[in-house]
Structure formats: C-alpha cells, structure tokens
Image: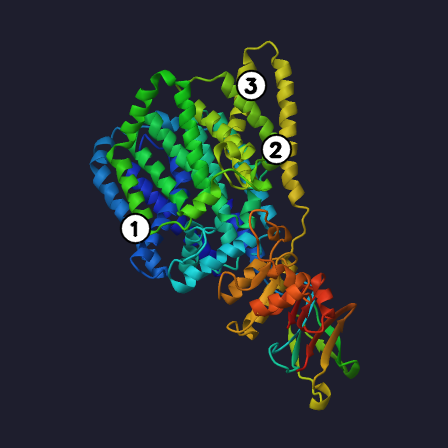
Amino acid sequence: MLLISFSVLFVIEAKNHNYDYKKSWSVVYFDNPRDDSLDFTIENHQGGKAEYDYEIFVGDDKVIDDKIKIEAGAKQKISPVIEDEKSKENKITIVVDYKDVEYKIYKNIR
Amino acid sequence: MFISLPKLILVLPFILILPGFFLLLAFFGWKNEKISFFEKSALAVPLSLISVDLIVLLLARINVPLKGLNLVGSILIFCLLCFIVFQFRFRKKNQKSESREKRNGSESFFDFSFWQTVFILLSIALAIFIRTAYLSDTILPSSTDLGHHMYWVQKIIDSGELPDYGMPDFIIGEHMIFAAVNLISGVSLMSAMPALVLLLFNVAGIFAMAILLARLFKDKNIIAFSFFVAGVLYAVNAPQAKYVSGGVVGNVIGNMLIPIALYFLYRALKEKNQIFAGLSLFSFLGLLYTHHLSSLILIFSVAAILFVYLVLNFKRVFRIIGDWLKIFLKPAPIFFLISSLLYLLFIFTPSYFNSAAIGQATGSPLKVTRIGLNFDQIEMSVGSARLLLGALGFLLIFLNIKPKKIRYSFALGWFAILFVMAYKPGWLFINIPSDRIGNYLFLPLTLLSAYALVRYFEFFQSAASRFFATVLLFTLMFFVITDGMADSAEAFKTRPQFQEAMQTFHSADYLAKTLDTSQDVILKDHVNIYGDSWYKLFFMKDYKYPLSRGNLSRYVDPTKPRETCTRDMISDPQSDKGKMCFSETGVNYVVLNAQFEGNSFEKYPEFSKVYGSNYISVFRL
C-alpha cells in the first residue's frame, strides 16, 4: 500500500513539475536584465500553439507592432532593432498580448 | 522520472530499514521472546534513522567526505558489525534453543483475530489513502519550511560536509537523512522525495504508537483501535499529513521517536531489562540530534510519568528509585550513556546546545503566542472527537487506576504534563509557542482514545444499562468518525497551486542564470509568492539570499526591535526609509506577485520591469 502510495505521489509530482503539464501561462523577459540590451523572449506555456501580438514603445511612441506564433512549450527570442538615438535616456516598453492578458516589461535606458 | 522512482524505492529500505533491522538483530537475534516480529518491523525505521544519523555524524567528524559511495560503505560496515555482534551473542544460544523453539507469551498479543486483522489493515489502508489523496495536491515541493530545510540539505550534498548553521533554528538531524537519500539514490530534492521520506516517518509513527500501546495495555483491541485513532482520525490535520506536506521535519520525526523512546523506557522499567534501557537512551540521543522541542517534550513527559508513579507509590519511593537505578547502572545503558555523551561532546554538538538558545525557551512566557492555549484552541489543535475520547479515556483510567502498575502513570502523566505545557506553560517556566506544544497532545490522546473505545464496553458490561451504553457508544462513534473525517475532507477543498509554484521556480531559474550574485541582491515577497522559500536552492549562495519580506506580523515584536527594511522596500519603496534601505542593503532586484505589489511597482519610475508572467513580476532598480 505504501509502495503504491509512493509511486502514485512520485509520478504526480514528476508530471506536474513541468512548465506545461495542465498549465496555462506565458512569460516575457529580457534576455539580459543587467544591461540596456533589448533582446527579449516570449515563452508559451498555454497548453497549445499560441499567437502573441507584441508592441514596442519608445517613451509613448509605438515603434514596432507585430505578431508571432509560438508552439506549445516553446520559446521565441526577439531582437528588436531600435535606433540608438531614440532609445537613449528613454523608457523602452514591450507589451505582449495573448487573448485578454497583457504581459509588459520595460527598461529605463541609462 | 522512470529511473528515479525505482532508485528511490530501492534506496529507502537500504537506508531506513536495513540498519535498524541489523541493530535489532545484534540485540535480540532472529527470534527472541522479548520482541515480536511486529515490533521489530515497527522499530526498523526509527532505529535506522538514528543509526544513519550517527553514522553520518561520525563520518563528518573524521573528515570522510559525505558522498554516496562512502555512505553505502559505512552503512554496510555498520550492518556487518551488527551481524558480528549477533553471531557472537546468539550463535550458541540459537544452537541450543533451536530445537525447543516455540512461540512465546509476549508475542501472543500480536496474534490478531481475523476481524482485528481486517480492522487494522483497513485502518492502515485508509490512513495511507487519505494521506496520499491529500498529498497529491501538495506534493510539488513548495512549502516554506521544507524549502528552508532543503537549502541546508543541498548544502550538505554540495559540500560533502555538515553545515555550520550559525543559528539555533535548525538541527542537523532534520537534514542528514535527506542528504543521505539524495547522495545514494541521486533523486533530486526538488522532487517528491522529501515529502515521501516524511510520509514514511509519519506512517512509522502510527506503528510506533501501536507497539507502545501494545506493551502498555497488552490488549489487541486497543492496538487495533490505536491504528484507527492515530491513522485515520484527523489524518490531515497537523501534525499529520499537513506537517508532511508542510515540511515540518523535526515534528514529524519527533512524533515517531517520542513513542519509541517511551516504548523502550516502559519495557526497561517494567521488565527490568538493561538492553531496553540502553535503547531508550539511544532513541533519546536520536531525538536530541533531530528536534529540540520534541526532546523537551520527551524530557517533561518522562519526568511527569515517573513523578506520577512515585506519588502513587509514595510509600515505596526509595525502593522504586533504587530498582530503577539498578536497571540503568548496568553495562548496556552505561555504554549507551557514555557513547551518547561522547557523541554530544566530541563528535557533534547540536546547534541549540548553548545558554542563549536554552534561555530563549525557558522562563516566564512574554509573548501572547506563548502564554498558553485556551480550551477552544486546544480543541481546535487536537480535534473535538479525539479530545472527547481522550477525556473519556482519562476518566476511565482514573477510575480503574492500579497504582502499582506503571502503565497508568504513563497514560495519566503523559497527558497531564502536555496539557499543562500547552494550557499554562508559565507554571513550568516554558517559553515556547503554545500551539507547537499543543500539537504533541495528539500522542497521549491517541493512547487515551484507543483505551476509551475499548474499555467503554467492558466498563458497562456488568451494568444493567448496557442498552443505553450501546446507544451512547454508537452516538459517540458517529460523532467521532464524522468529526474526525470531516476535518480531513475540509482540507481537500484547497486548490492545488502547481501552476503558481512552477512560475515561481521559473522566475528563480531566470534570475539564477542571468544575475551576478556577487553584485546583485534580490528581495522577494514571501507574503504573496507561493513556494518562494525554494528560491534559495537556485542560488545556493547563503541561507539569507535572496532577502525576503516575511509575514507582516513578524515585524512587530514587543520584546525587541526588528529590522523592517525587507518590509519597507516593498511596502513603500519611495519613502525616505525605503530609499535608505535600498541603499544600505544593496537590493537592486525585487520579485513580486504580479497581481499585488507587482502592479503598484509599475508606477515607480526608478524601476525597470525585466520579467513578467501571469504570476510573477521582477523589477530592477
């Protein structure tokens, strides 16, 4: 009985110790949080292939508006090209939308 | 996963059954009238735990690196030594007695009838089933206490040495066994392994109570009911499955070792047996290395039991004390006592063995959490049904008391002292959170409840009112079962938080891979982030890294000022105090729940938001 219990619990834990199994979430992050680089990654843990809209703002100005499809459990790195002059001493905001949820990250460029 | 599971299933018996089995073999041989197979099975796990702990301590003391191969070799050597002792002590005896081997009287009360066996098996099955069902929603490693403990375990694994805690909060016995399982099996700490090891101890604790009751009352029905009371009633309520999933390591192990120590003590006193006396000291040493509160509870329990017995037999006090001294002044207990002292003095001294830690736990209680529980709180702590049955058991034992039989002192003294410790700790100069003491009441209450259930019928057997007694009993049983089981059912209403935990781990993994921990300082919000105590395992920099905003009540302490920076940097980062704290602590990353402070932090212009998921936001200063 205890052996069965241990096996069941071990398998339940192992299955759920996974970013995708029975889960529905996404994450957006800068690849390097320590510097001013703007490369970022979107990870799809929604449980199926998902299309994300993403917009990039320099201050209040939208400079990029695009879409990207990401397979379930996959991640996609994006390297936005923004003129140095524009981004200097400005706030760069990346807004990623999936369905009704908005994921926002930003850096204050020094 | 498919390799880890069989490895764990093979390694657990190697570590947690084999050493105890060989230790018992050395003391009692294959078959011995003093101890039954049932008792050996129940004792194998706790004695293995203590043996492995002592082996690890010795290895560390002689600077042998704590690695898998070394541990396997040492455990095998220990087993071999026990086997040699067994050969030396029992070979001749076995040859002589083999032909006239027969079943002895002491084993007979473990020969259960068909229905008793069915009842016990059903109780055990139900006990494991309820725990498994509850743990299936909490099995992902995420509880706060377990996270703190596993940091130290990982420290042992990484360094191959025992850690220097630098604080009395942690005790080495809470960590060595998990390190041993990992080092031998390779099964990660961030898996079900820690909870499964605790579950094994929890179930072993049920058996420990059963053998204690068996020896105390020598009644098969009481043994059978002890499985029901300890295993099924309030199976989830603390200190049962909730403590397993919550990672309250010291308590779970303590709840297994306390009955074992009392079992050996009872048998030593009752049977005037020096081996049992030695093993009671051995169990106590194991407890000292595992949990300070459990050790204190055991000391008070033993003192109360002996005191009650002496009071009940005050005319024979000196003779009784003389008899006890005769038992403990024999070679086996003296050997164990000296070995224990040598271990404590020269091999490893527990971190709480200092005047400051002892001073904190003794004296008049000052805080409101330490001045004692009222009846309602005690009832909540142990459960209404168990308390009611226990009170009935106490009354029945009191009415049936036979002063010369120490079993009655065990039952009454054990409950009485724990009740006073929980209800009025000031009377005993105990300065420890009362709710933590209250959780131990379930041990004597299990004893009293099982006794009450069985003796109830016998008590009314001769009475003319047997019909009414039966009706009353069934009414009582209905209440006991519905109340005891309803408590467990209530626990299942909580939603599993696997998704939140995995997002917490993802953010920790992201920061561990991208930050430079020699320069970057992280502050996380323990109040609103699930599973955050496991964050430190991703960095393994320091126990206090990352910094953490604790539960808000912890910042208010009438006895001494507390640091408040970890609170202020999240609650009010733009205040003068908040800014000063950022400057002083060097915190430049703040991890928050996206739905709470995560939203409000977006309005602070000094911060960049570098990570955003449904659950976690990370800000950089």
Same subunit, tags 1 and 3:
yes
Q: Which mark is residue B374?
A: 2
What is the secondary structure assignment of the residue under circle 2? Answer: loop
What is the secondary structure assignment of the residue under circle 3? Answer: helix
Q: Which mark is residue B457?
A: 3
- Of pointers 1 and 2, the one earlier in the residue sequence: 1
Query: Would you say B69 lies left or right of B375 here?
Result: left
Quote the CA–CA distance across marks 1 and 2: 43 Å
Q: Label 2: few (<14), some or many (≥20) within 10 Å?
A: few
Q: Label 1: few (<14), some or many (≥20) within 10 Å?
A: few
* Mark 1 and mark 3 residues within 8 Å of each other at the beta carbon: no
Question: Which-is-in-front pick, marks 1 and 3?
Answer: 1
Q: Which mark is residue B98?
A: none
Same subunit, tags 1 and 2:
yes
Please tell me whether residue B249 is drawn above or below residue B472 in the rendered image.
below
Whole-percent x, y for residue B395 in the image: 54, 20
The residue beneath circle 1 is: B346
Please tell me whether residue B436 is drawn above or below residue B448 in the rendered image.
below
Amino acid type at image mark 1: Phe
Quote the CA–CA distance across marks 1 and 3: 54 Å
* Residue B192 visible from this viewpoint: no
Chain label for disc 2: B
Amino acid type at image mark 2: Asn
The image quadrant of residue B163 is: bottom left
Colour logic: rainbow
